[in-house]
Image: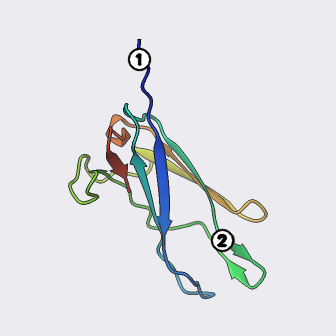
Amino acid sequence: MTIVEPVLVMTKTGPLTAYVGVPATFTLDVHNVGGSAAYAVILAERLPKEPDGGMCDLQPQNITAQVFEADGTTPVSPVLAEGTDFTASFTGDPDCSLTLSMQSPDTTIGVDQRLV
């Protein structure tokens, strides 16, 4: 018997510096490099928290998500809807975290696919 499982690798991209009062865009790219699909994925991300600024005061806005082929441009799923396909939970100071919970079948990350 061979048991296969998903292996998820996440990369985060965004600006190297953020400025107080200026929104910044970050991208989380979750690539399934394992041997089976990943279902009901939960992403927990620590947000920047610095003495002179950070992202703990306001909940992140305009969260979008979609599943793509490995190339990152060929869509596999429709654009995912917050509240239907996934939920977003924000915890401010002192934890300063964002948790995204995938809920619908459209959020399944197949082998060599990406959730972006």
Give x and y (percent) for residue 77.
26, 46
Q: Amino acid at mark 1?
A: Thr
The image quadrant where one finds the C terminus is bottom left
Q: Mark 2: few, some, or many residues within 10 Å (few <14, many ≥20)?
A: few
The quadrant the N terminus occupies is top left
The residue sitting at 34% across, 34% down in the picture is 105
* Residue receiving disc 2: 48
Q: Which residue is mark 1?
A: 2
Which residue: 60% across, 88% down? 19
| In this view, the mark in front (1 or 2) | 1
Report the Cα–Cα distance between label 1 and label 2: 41 Å
Instruction: Name the residue furthest top.
Output: 1
Q: Secondary structure at mark 1?
A: loop
Q: Position of residue 76 (x, y in %)?
A: 24, 46
Tag 2: amino acid: Pro
The extreme left residue here reads 74
Which label is found at residue 59?
A: none
How was the colour assigned to the protein in this rendering?
rainbow
Residue at the far front in the pictured view: 1
Is 36 or 116 nearer to us in this picture?
A: 36
Choose top left, top right, bottom left or bottom right for residue 112. top left
Question: Viewed as shown, does residue 33 lie left or right of 93?
Answer: left
Depth check, front residue: 3 or 59: 3
109 left or right, relative to 74: right
Q: Which comes sooner in the sequence, label 1 or label 2?
A: 1
Q: Is residue 75 above or below residue 61?
A: above
- Camera-nearest residue between 62 and 13: 13
Direction from residue 104 to residue 10 in the image, left or right: right
In the displayed structure, 111 sits above or below 81; it is above
